[in-house]
Structures are given as C-alpha cells and as structure tokens.
Image (tube, helix red, strand yellow):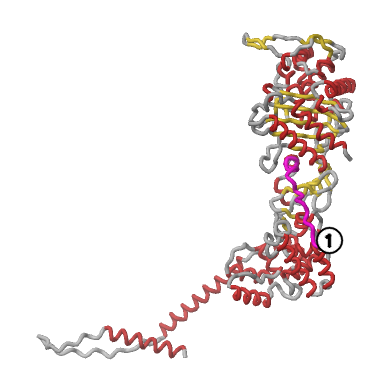
C-alpha cells in the first residue's frame, strides 16, 4: 500500500513536471519552418546496483549514528553505584545546657535518622500517600502513570505526576529537576536500576531523610522538630499523617501556614492508610479528631547572636564544610530561660531610654551572663533584633568602658602592695599632656569630696583619684594586670586608661569581673561543652582551667567595695539583688552606658549605646540606663 502511494505521488509529480515544460502552442506559421528532430524516448529512474549500494550505506550510516547516540546517552547516565555512598548535607545541631535544640548551622536543615529508629507507621504513611504499590513495582508504576495522565487530561493541566518513591529518590540524588522527556526517560531507566541494587528499606531510608517537607526542613526528623518540636520517635499517628501529606505541596499543606489545608490533607492520608489496611478505620478517625498542635518556632532569633558566636568558635577546630555536612551535635553552655530573660531585659531597657529621649533614635543594647566559677556563658544577647542586624555587640564591638574599668586599676595598685586604707585627694588636678598642652581630668558634674579612702573613691567613682592611683602604681603594672584579667583589646599606655578611654568588648570586661567575685580566679569565657559526631563519638571541648589573676585578698577587697557601690553609690539602681556587687560606667557625652556586676553565681555585663557613637541623651548614665537592665535580668535569674 505504501509503495502504491509512493508511486502515485511520484507519477503526479512527474506529470506536473512534464506539463510544466511543454512548449506553448501557436497557430501562426514559423518564418523558417524546419523539421524538428525526434527526441529520444524518456526513460524512468532505474535502481541499479550502484544506487542500491549508496542507499544501503546511507541507511547503515544513519542506523550507526542513532545507535551510537543512544549508546553515548546510556553511558552519560549517572553512575547508579554512587547511591551506596549516600552522604547528604546534614545540619549541625546546637543544643542548650539542658540538651534542648535551639538552632542549626546548615544550608539544608537535615538530621539523619536510621530507618530502624523510625516509628513503623511513618514509612507506611508516606507509602500510602505517595506510592501505594511501592512494595510491588520495580521503580515504575504503569498504573499510576496512566491514572495520572488521564486525570491530567481531564483537568487540562499537569496536576498529578505519577512518580514513584523510587523515581523521587532517583531525581533527588542523580538528576536535575529539568522538565523534559529525556530527563523522564533517564529517570525511568535509573529508577529500574536503583531497584536492582538497593532494598526497598534502603530506598525508603534515603527518601525519608532526603525529601523536602517545607519551612526549610529536609527529611522527616527535621520536619518533626520544625512542625511539632519533637523527634520522629515522639510523633503521634495524626502528626505522622500530617508529615506524610506534605510532599505533594509542602507550602500549601504546611500546618504552620495553612492549618485547614493541612488538616484536609491529613484526613486524606489517614483514609488511605485505612484503605490499605495499615490502620483501622477507628484509629484513623480517632487520630483525625485528636488533631495536631503545631509547635512554636524553636529556632528563635533570640539565640541568633549566641549561635553565630558558637559557629565562630567551631571554625577554630572544624572546617566550614564539616559544619554543613557532618551532622555534628554541639552541646553548649547557654540557658534558654536566661536567654529569654536577657532578651526582654535588654529590649525593655532600650525602650525606656528611647521613651526618655523622644526625637532620638532608639539605641542598641547588649548583655552577657557568665557563670562566675567557670566562665561558662549562660546568656548572650548582642542586640535588640537579630533578624534586622546580626552585629554581635557583646564580642564584635569594642567600646570605651568609662568608670567600669576602674576596678582593674584599683586591683593593679593593691597587687603592687598599696595599702587598702590609703587616702587620696579628690580634688582638681592638672597634668602635662605633651606638646606643651595640659590635661585637666575632672569628676562627673565637677563634684569633688576632698580626701577619700579607696573604698569611698570607688563608691563615688572619683575620676581624679583613679588618675592619681594609676600614676602611683604605674602604667606597666596596670597594663600587665589588665591582661592577666583576660583583656586582649589594645590598651592605650597613658593615664586615660584610668578613665576607661580604651575600647574593650562586653564579653572581656564581664569575664574580668568574674575574678573579683571568685577569690581572684579568672576563667576565660567558654560556650561549648562537647561535640558529638553522627557515629556518636563525643569530643570534649576545652574548658577554662582558671588561673589566679589576682590574690584572694585583693579580690575580696574589690568585691566588698563593689557591693558598697550598689548599696549607696553610683550603682544604686541595681540594688535589691541578694549579694549584688558591681560598677557603673559612663563615657563622655553619655555615649556609652555600662553596668557590670555579680550575684547568685552569675557575673553579668550590660552595655547600651549607639553603633555610630552618638549620645544616648542627657542624663543617660550607666546607673540610670544600664543598671536597671542588669537588675531586671538578675531578678529573673533568681527564679527557679
């Protein structure tokens, strides 16, 4: 039949060609009529041996090219054996001191959970929702593909995909998400191969740890923590069904964003599980009626500053790829309850300053609380809003400390042998400043009290006594003592050191004060206790061994004087905390406000100011702006 069609079409073409070249007819005689020679009879195309050879060679060439192309494509397919070395990106999990997860370090938030550690109903729920013939097919399910195609034709859009769990694993591990027939064919071939080298349980293990389930969660363990604040082993049947309903559309079925749609999808999954005999109809109904209670977001921004600090600490021992790939679990020293208290104290203190200073920009604040006897960080808040600004003012910002530095000057003098009963004149002083200039350090509000012993001078924060004390004990001894108390910031080797002119971080200043409240023992700040890898091997993190930075006698005197500062000096706004001791700090033009003090086993430092070093406003001293923040936090710290 096809031959006949070909012949007829050839004949039609030949006739049209023949007709096109017929000479035009005329009735007029030609002026010179000559006999027209007879043309040779036309002959049709004859398939001789030479033509046949060319045809066969051409066909063979085309077939060879096609076979070669197909073979090259087959060889270009990803190596299926690579799935044996399944190593996904696994998040580093950060825990608080009580083992509660507070944050992650991850590009993809994923926590690997072994298949045998999953609740038995968990994989079955995903199978019921996504691939009910999973146990029977070899990677492809012709019935599901056909059903999806029919439904898509009916709806006029691609609403169903028909992909099996095996195909989803293949796509995630070996292919891109390009939408093309070539990719679909590759997916089908590779899925069949995958079924040949992995067991069904191994495929499920990869699938349940790899799949994206919305809200930044990859895999069922991350999703369980994100949506319900639980591990997979703690999930209820209703929660399992909710997770199993997410793969089709993680955003639209999110129990956090679209609870009603998530509940409808949960009902579908429960019904599918009942239809497949996985659970009874009664169990499905009970799980649906019980409902689910989504968790409050556990990765709260209040932990952001501390988490960044921990990340930087980890990078001193691990590579960045380790943090993103190795699934480390980092046990830290921070207390979540104190973190919340610190956040509220800083925000309330900043709001109070802003309210007292209308028309000025709201300042920033920072707070760090250390366990006095060990240096372990119990709270760290580097600003008022981590989501808006990640600059950690407890460690990254070196600020002038004002009078908060004076206890270090006093400690250096006492360590040099100066009697604690020494008296200095609290009166104006004029000193040469070099270049023929004079320096006239003065007290706050230019108030002077005459002769004062060291305790009274510290209680009333006399600037001129601090300068006289530094001149007597010597700059070298003051610098040396400051470094022994953990100060690493560069300190200016001149008399302005007595007035806190050299910028220091909140963390270093707070750590220095721990020695005053702990018999002279200094412990460097530490935020990590140990790191555990995926295999469960625990690596202890180096803890501060502590060192005798000042004598116990000097520490006892300093702490007693700082207690008087709180009771009747510049730190009176911090009074009311049992055993409280501390010191205020205010820099020129009220640019920085400090309070650092100890009580109840904690040493806490507070700073308020502007990042661009503008004034907080008239009257915003350390005692007025920072001390109430310290007290507010410490009151909460006292609660059980």
Where is residue 170? Give x, y as percent. Answer: 68, 65
Quarter containing the C terminus: top right
Residue 333 placement, left or right of 192: right
Nearest the viewer among 490 and 403 is 403
Instruction: Identify whether 339 is placed above or below 503.
Output: below
Classed neighbour count for the residue bearing mark 1: other residues with Cα under 10 Å, few (<14), some (14–19), many (≥20): few
Nearest the viewer among 439 and 136 is 439
Instruction: Identify whether 45 is placed above or below 498.
Output: below
Q: Residue at x 71, y 50 (%)?
A: 106
In which quarter of the view is residue 491 placed? top right
Residue 290 placement, left or right of 177: right
Q: Residue at x 70, y 9 (%)?
A: 430
In which quarter of the view is residue 175 placed? bottom right
Q: Residue at x 80, y 31 (%)?
A: 630
Question: Callout 1: helix, strand or loop?
Answer: helix
Nearest the viewer among 55 and 589 is 589
Please give the residue where the numbered disc 1 appears in the rendered image.
117
Residue 63 placement, left or right of 92: left
* Magenta segment boundaries in residue numbering: 291-308
In which quarter of the view is residue 202 placed? bottom right
Q: Is residue 302 magenta?
A: yes
Where is residue 26? Give x, y as percent. Answer: 16, 87
Instruction: Identify whether 152 is placed above or below 583.
Output: below
Where is residue 292? Give x, y as percent. Answer: 79, 60
Nearest the viewer among 560 and 69 is 560
Instruction: Identify whether 174 is placed above or below 438.
Output: below
Q: Is residue 316 magenta?
A: no
Where is residue 336? Give x, y as percent. Answer: 81, 43
Residue 471 visible? The answer is no
């Amino acid at each position: 039949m096809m031959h006949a069609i070909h012949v007829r079409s050839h004949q039609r073409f030949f006739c049209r060609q023949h007709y096109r070249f017929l000479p035009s007819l005329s009735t007029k005689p030609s002026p010179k009529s000559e006999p027209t020679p007879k043309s040779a009879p036309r002959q049709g195309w004859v398939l001789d041996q030479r033509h046949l050879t060319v045809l066969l060679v051409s066909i063979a060439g085309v077939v060879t090219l096609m076979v070669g192309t197909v073979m090259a494509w087959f060889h270009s397919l990803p190596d299926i054996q690579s799935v044996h070395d399944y190593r996904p990106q696994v998040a580093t999990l950060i825990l608080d001191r009580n083992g509660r997860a507070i944050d992650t370090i991850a590009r993809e938030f994923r926590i690997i959970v072994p298949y045998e550690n999953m609740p038995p109903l968990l994989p079955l729920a995903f199978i019921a929702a996504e691939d009910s013939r999973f146990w029977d097919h070899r990677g492809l399910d012709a019935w599901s593909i056909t059903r999806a195609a029919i439904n898509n034709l009916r709806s006029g859009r691609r609403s169903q995909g028909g992909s099996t769990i095996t195909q989803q694993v293949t796509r995630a591990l070996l292919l891109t998400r390009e939408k093309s027939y070539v990719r679909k064919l590759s997916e089908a071939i590779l899925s069949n191969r995958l079924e040949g080298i992995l067991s069904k349980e191994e495929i499920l293990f990869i699938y349940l740890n790899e799949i994206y389930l919305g809200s930044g969660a990859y895999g069922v363990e991350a999703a369980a923590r994100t949506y319900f604040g639980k591990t997979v082993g703690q999930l209820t049947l209703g929660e399992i069904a909710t997770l199993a309903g997410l793969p089709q559309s993680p955003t639209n079925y999110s129990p956090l964003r679209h609870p009603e749609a998530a509940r409808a999808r949960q009902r579908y999954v429960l019904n599918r599980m009942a239809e497949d005999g996985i659970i009874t109809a009664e169990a499905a109904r009970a799980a649906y009626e019980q409902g689910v209670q989504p968790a409050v977001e556990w990765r709260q921004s209040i932990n952001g500053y501390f988490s960044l600090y921990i990340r930087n600490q980890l990078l001193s021992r691990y590579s960045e790829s380790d943090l993103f790939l190795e699934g480390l679990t980092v046990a830290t020293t921070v207390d979540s309850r104190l973190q919340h208290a610190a956040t509220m104290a800083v925000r309330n203190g900043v709001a109070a300053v802003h309210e007292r200073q209308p028309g000025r920009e709201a300042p920033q604040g920072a707070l760090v609380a250390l366990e006095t006897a060990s240096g372990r960080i119990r709270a760290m808040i580097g600003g008022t809003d981590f989501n808006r600004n990640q600059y950690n003012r407890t460690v990254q910002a070196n600020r002038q400390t004002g009078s908060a530095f004076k206890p270090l000057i006093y400690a250096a003098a006492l360590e040099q042998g100066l009697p604690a009963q020494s008296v200095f004149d609290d009166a104006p002083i004029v000193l040469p400043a070099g270049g023929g200039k004079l320096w006239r350090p003065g007290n706050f509000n230019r108030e002077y009290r005459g002769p004062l012993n060291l305790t009274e001078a510290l209680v009333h924060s006399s600037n001129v006594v601090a300068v006289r004390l530094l001149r007597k004990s010597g700059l070298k001894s003051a610098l040396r003592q400051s470094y022994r108390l953990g100060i690493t910031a560069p300190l200016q080797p001149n008399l302005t050191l007595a007035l806190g002119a050299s910028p220091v971080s909140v963390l270093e200043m707070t750590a220095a004060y721990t020695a005053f409240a702990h018999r002279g023992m200094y412990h460097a700040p530490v935020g990590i206790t140990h790191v555990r890898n995926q295999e469960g091997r625990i690596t202890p993190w180096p803890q501060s061994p502590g060192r005798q930075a000042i004598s116990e006698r000097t520490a006892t005197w300093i702490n007693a004087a700082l207690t008087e500062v709180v009771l009747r000096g510049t730190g009176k706004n911090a009074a009311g905390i049992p055993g409280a001791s501390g010191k205020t700090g205010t820099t020129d033009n009220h640019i920085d406000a400090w309070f650092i003090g100890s009580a109840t086993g904690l040493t806490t430092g507070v700073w308020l100011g502007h990042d661009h070093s503008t004034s907080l406003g008239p009257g915003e001293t350390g005692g007025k702006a920072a001390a109430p923040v310290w007290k507010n936090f410490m009151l909460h710290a006292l609660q059980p």
